Image: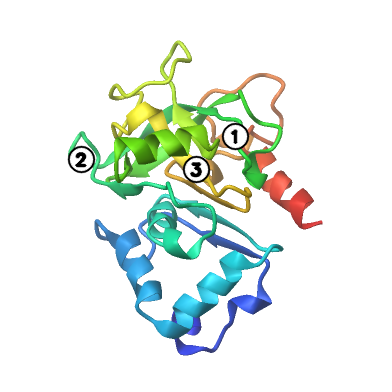
Amino acid sequence: MSDILSGRVSLEEFKGLVACGGFSYGDVLGAGEGWAKSILFNARARDGFQAFFERKDSFALGVCNGCQMMSNLHELIPGTENWPHFVRNRSEQFEARVAMVQIQDSPSIFLQGMAGSRLPIAIAHGEGHAEFESEEAMLQADLSGTVALRFVDNHGKVTERYPANPNGSPRGITGLSSRDGRVTIMMPHPERVFRAVTNSWRPDEWQEDGGWMRMFRNARVWVD
């Protein structure tokens, strides 16, 4: 970010952008929103990010803090007008646990061929509650097919109940895609469980790779 803000590096040089979690851009609550403002209020960075997102050969992934950051950049990202903001968990505390999500049928380039899968995933956030501008915005997000991930309970049903839904997001929504699928945001951490060995339980047929490795292979296929 320092290089982008100063002009030493341009996003024109890149095809992909991943905004990661782990309290990126500050070990404080609201860091993702501050990260977004550093872009929105800097003319060079704002123009660079907008041009990047508007390119048809670019892709981006936002996880946790990166999810919160990109959701606040929705005015720069085509096809994300119904994305929510991510605010304080309903539990009023930081949540670090394993949750279960179901992958939805969405245009996300990362999740192609994975719709219907229910997979355990790591979560670690204090501000993961998806807050939509209105009921209408939430309905439009649902109807547009851009909801990419939902929390489900032990019976595989979409849930808003704690702790299966650790932040209380409506309709279990915890990941979204842009309309063309090039930009995906999610609050859980797939990068923490893409190896079989990092899962506390796994099917016997899993060898080196966990189920979430498919996400990153999908991105490679799309770039090729």
The residue depicted at 35 percent of the width and 37 percent of the height is 136
The residue that disc 3 covers is: 176
User: Relative to the observer, which residue lies in front, 207 or 123?
Assistant: 123
Residue most extreme to the top? 155
Pointer 3 local density, CA inside 10 Å: few below 14, some 14–19, many at least 20? many
The alpha-carbon separation of the residues under discs 1 and 3 comes to 27 Å
Q: In which quarter of the view is residue 53 placed?
A: bottom right
Q: Amino acid at mark 2?
A: Gln
The residue depicted at 46 percent of the width and 88 percent of the height is 6
Q: Could you tell me which secondary element the residue under label 1 belongs to?
A: helix
Left of 91 or right of it: where is 127? right
The alpha-carbon separation of the residues under discs 1 and 2 comes to 29 Å
Q: Can residue 34 be seen in the rendering of this structure?
A: yes
Do the numbered discs 1 and 2 sit on residues whose CB atoms are within 8 Å? no
Q: From the viewer's perspective, is residue 11 above or below residue 119?
A: below
Do the numbered discs 3 and 2 sit on residues whose CB atoms are within 8 Å? no
The residue that disc 1 covers is: 197
Q: Amino acid at mark 3?
A: Leu
User: Relative to the observer, which residue lies in front, 21 or 62?
Assistant: 62
Q: Could you tell me which secondary element the residue under label 3 belongs to?
A: strand
Q: Work out whether mark 3 precedes mark 2 in sequence or the reverse, and give the earlier one.
A: 2
- List x then y, in percent, for residue 164: 35, 23
The residue that disc 2 covers is: 93
Which image quarter holds the C terminus? Answer: bottom right
Pointer 2 local density, CA inside 10 Å: few below 14, some 14–19, many at least 20? few
- List x then y, in percent, for residue 123: 40, 39
Query: Which dot, 1 or 3, sits closer to the camera?
Result: 3
Q: In which quarter of the view is residue 110 placed?
A: top right
Q: Could you tell me which secondary element the residue under label 2 belongs to?
A: loop
The residue depicted at 45 percent of the width and 39 percent of the height is 141
